[in-house]
Image (cartoon, rainbow, N blue to C red):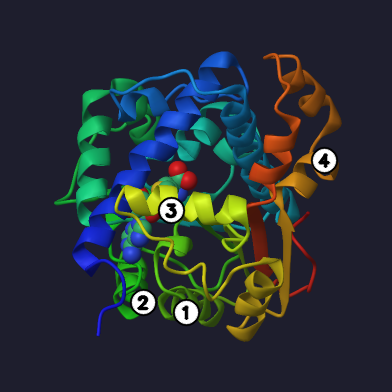
Amino acid sequence: MEVGFPKTIQDEATRKTAGDACFSKISSAELGYFTDGYSKFFTKNKRKMMPLINRGTWTRVFSVRTLVNNFLSKFPTDKIQIVSLGAGFDCNFFYYQENVLEFNERDLHYFEVDFEDITAQKIDIIKQHSELEELIFKDAEPSYEEGMIQTERYTLLSCDIRQVDDLEDKLVQVGLDKTIPTLVLTECVLCYMNSEDSSQIIAKIAEMFADVAIVNFEMINPNDPFGTTMVENLEARGCQLLGLKDVPDESAQVARMVDNGFQNGYCENMLRIHNSKLDETERSRIERIEMFDEFEEWDLLQSHYCICVGSKFSDSSELGF
Ligand SMILES: C[S@@+](CC[C@H](N)C(=O)[O-])C[C@H]1O[C@@H](n2cnc3c(N)ncnc32)[C@H](O)[C@@H]1O
């Protein structure tokens, strides 16, 4: 028997979150929290968000970028690949390609996967903006296959990532190399599916690659008063955090990685990451951007998000944090 909302309604609400993620990034990027000149193409809605939200978005974006940078430096000479599952309208590929030499000059491939209609919308928007096409196709004439983009460095394709065998087949068909160092990103994606599905995805990633790490960002602590409100607010919009009841806290996040094939799992909530793991200079720069006095709310909000890293790099080292 199906528990909660019917799957199609839940999937539809989950797809809408791609626009929400974009929305917050535009607000903080426009104020100068971080560089992102491209999210603005992916939604017509624009609104200045509260300082609390802008600072939270910066913490998320800066943390994920820090881990990606760590991955780039960890394998300075190898061919590498990054696979973003549930990539939505994320614009990090464009950011790296334009701004990060260590990325742009590397022999690497960046894969993005999402539901068919999100991928189709992303392709439509890319087609309308030559700035985006130039970053993807460089000097070559832009060319689009049915429902996907594929170039030497970048692939955008559609798949329901819960269909793990299909996911593997599709990625391998477009050139995924299981033998090279790989970083998988699941940013605010796994929490929307039940824990059997998210565990299967993690197990599939661990099984597919010898040298791999996964970076998972999502909500935690649904059972305290703040967490209950967070869950209820999303449910009111038709979107359930289906995975949260089985993976409610940092230790459950780590257990899910370790139980599904990653030797090394570690997790930090975003408050600890913000307070003690991020670059100090950058932190004091963003602290001067807006007046900020919501300290209690900040601590609460940030302690309800985390980054969990699962890694099975062959040298057993961690990725960072
Ligand atoms: C909150 S958005 C995050 C997007 C992006 N990772 C980011 O951080 O900006 C969640 C994304 O996951 C995608 N997603 C959720 N479940 C999925 C599934 N089963 N298969 C493919 N994509 C999925 C949604 O369509 C949506 O684009």
Could you tell me which residue is drawn at 41 percent across and 73 percent down?
Answer: 194
Q: Secondary structure at mark 4?
A: helix
Question: Residue 204 got which mark?
Answer: 1
* Res 76 visible: no
Q: Earlier in the sequence, mark 1 or mark 2?
A: 2
Position of residue 18 relative to residue 115, above or below, is above
Instruction: Give the Cα separation between the discs numbered 1 and 3.
Output: 31 Å
Residue at which label 2 appears: 164
Q: What residue appears at the point 57 percent right and 72 percent down from the top-left corner? A: 247
Instruction: Please determine whether, in this image, residue 175 is positioned above or below residue 98.
Output: below
Determine whether, in the image, residue 45 is placed left or right of residue 254: left
Q: Sequence order check: which comes first, mark 4 or mark 3?
A: 3
Query: Is 228 on the left-hand or right-hand side of 168?
Result: right
Of labels 1 and 3, the one closer to you: 3
Decide: marks 4, 2 in contact (CB < 8 A)?
Answer: no
- Where is residue 89? Give x, y as percent: 37, 40
Q: Specify the amino acid type for callout 2.
A: Val
> Whole-Å distance between the Cαs marked 4 and 1?
33 Å
Q: Which residue is mark 4?
A: 275
Q: CA distance from mark 1 to mark 2?
A: 7 Å
